[in-house]
Image (cartoon, rainbow, N blue to C red):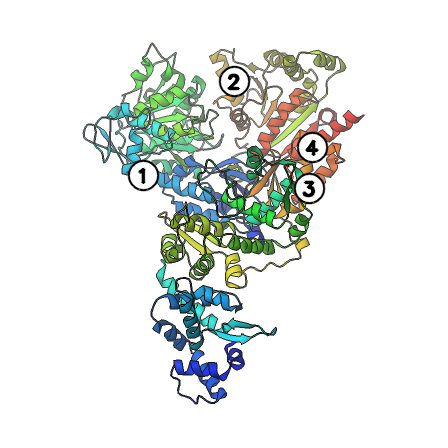
Amino acid sequence: MTAMSSSETLRKPLIVQSDGTILLEVAHPRYQQVRDQLLHFADLVKSPEHFHTYRIGALSLWQAASVGQSPEGVLSVLHEHSRYSLPLALQQMVLAEMNKYGSLILIPGDGCHILQGDRDLLAAIRHLPGMAAHLSGKRRVELQIKESARGSVKRLLASYGYPVLDRIGHVQGERLSIALRKKTLTGNAFLLRSYQQEAIESFSAGGIGEGSGVIVLPCGAGKTVVGIGVIAKLQTNTLVLTPNVLAARQWIRELLDKTNVSPDQVGEYTAEKKDVRPITVTTYQMLTYRKGEEHPHFAQLNGCGWGLIIYDEVHLLPAPIFRLTADVQSTRRLGLTATLVREDGAEHDVFAMIGPKRYEVPWKAMEADGYLAQARCYEVQVKMSGEWQARYELAAKRQKYRLASLNPAKVEVILSLLQKHRGDRVLIIGQYLEQLHDLATRLGVPVVTGRTKLEAREEQFRRFREGQSSVLIVSKVANVALDLPDANVAIQISGTFGSRQEEAQRIGRILRPNSDRSESHFYTVVTRGTVDCEMADRRQLFLTEQGYSYRLLDAEEICLAKW
Amino acid sequence: MRLSECLNSSSIDTLRKIAKRYSFDCSLSSKNSLMQEIMAHFNNRKFIEEAFSRQEAGEYREAVSHLMLDRRKTFSREDVLAMICRTGSLQDGQERMQRLLADGWIYLLNSKGGRQFYYIPDDLRRTMCDYLAQILKRRVKIADQEPIVYRDENFALQRDLIAFLNFVGKHSIRITKDGTIMKRTLQQLLSLFEISEEPLGKVVWRFGYGRRFHDYPDRFALIYDYCFAHRLIAETAEGELLLTANAQEWALQSEQARSEDLFRYWRILYRRPIPQLKLCIATIAQTTKADWVHLASMNELLAPYVRDYYYERAAAIMEKRIYQMLVHLGLLAYGQLACGTEVIRLTAFGRGALLEEAMVVEQEQEPGEQASKVPIIVQPNFDLLVPVESYERIAWELDEVADLIRIDVMRVHRITQKSVQRAFEIGWTDRTVLDFLREESDSMVPGNVERMIEQWGRAAQIGEM
């Protein structure tokens, strides 16, 4: 390439590394066109300001093949836009992995399922460890799979690097008459956004044999609405699985608010209530609950004539759910999530058990279209008083983080920030309960922690949602799928970096578009020169990689400013 | 030399023989009319093609095509004999030599120094090459679609050679009694290369393709032998591998010049086990200059020229020793069609080096300017992605402020607290580090990286105080 470094080759926007990492130059005139093409076969990993990072691998290539992309198409996009010539091994990987998809097809047979494929491939598969138990006959040209092993075989083969095209089809669920409202129960006009409509269409497309898969939408993009839209499209009895009770109730509230189903058609199946209705919402915990070898709740819910199972927040799906999901492969499945990245690396299971990615909109694209609020991130560095500094220096290593987090000097900064954001809806997020309660007392605002009773929690959230309170202090509970609409300022006063997912959730809290289209603000208050700062560095990296601009602020500056 | 010049410099006797051979209708006693008659015929493409194809297929016709595909300007008597005597006896050789002259394929002329040399007229050679290429092309299978997988290694070989020299210059490398680099060092070295290779596993038979071919994988063996033969490196009796003063001078050449020299060296090195290598290369060059050609059909075409070599079958020799090495040398591109069929085609550099065609994209810069300025990419996670063409120019600075992680399409270097502190100790400051990054990245340094380096700078100052 060196010899050919004419300006034309330099101008190409992609850099493809041999490990499957792809960089896309954001300022490039062809950025948008190339990004849209890339999203078909690569996953977005990071989106910092100048170059976005995507990755292609076996899974993303299977995903691409599953929606009809060809290796020729994928490679021609890479060849056309790549600044340097493509590594040979990578090109061969694209060809090999994409050709794998469709090379193994599962079809219905007589009293068993049939796995069809290349003879040599089938011979190799027959001898894979763990395979024998699922086979029934001895035919050579195809494999006879026990009917009960449909899911297990797909999952096993995916883990060995073979995607299986499932052509057995889904059972028809019981019919349910449901329609979206034009005007919500709470009186707001309700219209699906264009991308929500597209997501619903792309999931519902295809015959009965097709149609399971995952829709990837950023936090705040209205995943619940998309799920409800799919139910309305398919008109069938549906089981919704959510991470916790709060999220389950949120689903029920949304269902009643945005569709014409009556309250007695929607059931909550939790530790408190065991209503099985045409649309039943439950939690992962309920399903995986075990009594000896039995899963009583799963048994209860399985076989209720569901035409659709919705998995909310797929990236949080606990491993036992995959095993149970293997048994419901005959029911159409929809996964909803903000990210396919799983910290346990179980992406293969999601692909095999729920299905391939069917639709994705990246965060930044939605932000540009005004569907998500623009967020600004700040890090505010606070000094320690001499006395506190002395305690910090003397403390054992494990105590240091706590002391740095609890630095009392943070309170003044928080007060100034609240001053500045009078009239905004502010969430204060922290890890240490004593700090949160102290602050609540000083500010006279409500606090919600893990110890708050469910009813009280819901009440506080309702008040905040309805604008009766404008500041709410929450502990880590706020991280999980609950819905706090219209918060446009978040102040994080303590808390470890946690995981990428956790950070994504937190920032997701303030991404819903503000009614006046103003920017949202995300503050992290840290103690200067301590381990608190080190955590903040990781957060900075995460936010920068997500494409948020980040500013450092001095505590003194804030406290002196007259807002 | 053109045909007219060849005829002019030849004796009337020579011309007469040609005229008789083709039964030209002209005066045999006038040199002028002989010349005109011969010119008139030999300037006619059809006549030449017929003259060639009328000859019975066999060794003589092969010999003519070999001569025509050979790119040397002059041939000694021994050269010509060697080309036509591959199978027959010397007696046959004499006879065929006479026939070549009478047929007008070659001319024996006096050179300036008084020695005699054989010449092929340039215009005749051009016409014949085109014609031979046509014939050869009919015998290979041309791909009817573009490959979807393809790779042109371009000048990677000489870049890796430079990486090797840099490595030898920077590290003290111990070699074993047999003179080979220790395995761990070798692994470390190979991991720095753009085109990766694994150290050899257990091999039973491996010889014939160079001094260290037995010890190193194919590509690196070539790099090493080239360096050793050109005295860019030296193996000392004390068991050390050292860089010599020649290395720096060598690196001053342009990339293209380095690549061409590597190719010349390789051709001589591999000629012993593959005596007809030159012809193989010429055949490949003629058939793949414009189209992607099925590898399998090329194998058939080369089959008569490539023999088994002790431990290796002819087919393996074609693939590993000829095609693969031509790919490494940047002359040949390798591809795969959607159905998986393997295909090859000459690269732009290959056309330039093997067919003397002007390279499609000319790039003749001053060697000093050659390391063009292509910006590096600074990532928020402190990775620096460095384009190969910029690396040479800023290798020194990079080495001081960052650590090398791996070589890839773009080299990955990483800035760490340690690497920056190391830089501070040898005179860098947070400001100069940032200036360097901004300058090289076209001012695209992520904010968190800027802040962190400034923070490290402040911490270092406090430390000093």
Which amino acid type corresponds to the residue marked 1 in the rendered image? Ser
Instruction: Estimate the spatial distance between the alpha carbons at disc 4 and disc 2, rounded to whole Å.
Output: 40 Å
Q: Which one is nearer the viewer's eye here, B364 or B65?
A: B65
User: Circles 1 and 3: CB distance less than 8 Å?
Assistant: no
- Helix, strand or loop at disc 3? helix
Q: Which residue is mark 2?
A: A477
Q: Is A311 on the left-hand or right-hand side of A303?
A: right
Task: State which tag comes first along the sequence, 1 or 2.
Answer: 1
Q: Where's residue B420, x and y in %?
A: 69, 32
Q: In whole angstroms, how far apart are the C-alphas of marks 4 and 1?
A: 51 Å
In percent of width and height, residue B201 lies at 47, 36
Q: What chain letter is assigned to the residue under label 4? A: B
Q: Amino acid at mark 2?
A: Val
Q: Residues within 10 Å of mark 4 (few under 14, many from 20)?
A: many
Q: Amino acid at mark 4?
A: Val
User: Which residue does the numbered mark 3 point to in the structure image?
Assistant: B396
Q: On the rendered image, what quadrant is the C terminus of chain B found in?
A: top right
Q: Which residue is mark 4?
A: B420
Q: Identify the image quadrant of residue B279.
A: bottom left
The amino acid pointed to by label 3 is Trp
Determine whether B344 is above or below B173 in the image.
below
Pointers 4 and 1 within a single chain: no
- Identify whether A528 is placed above or below A54: above
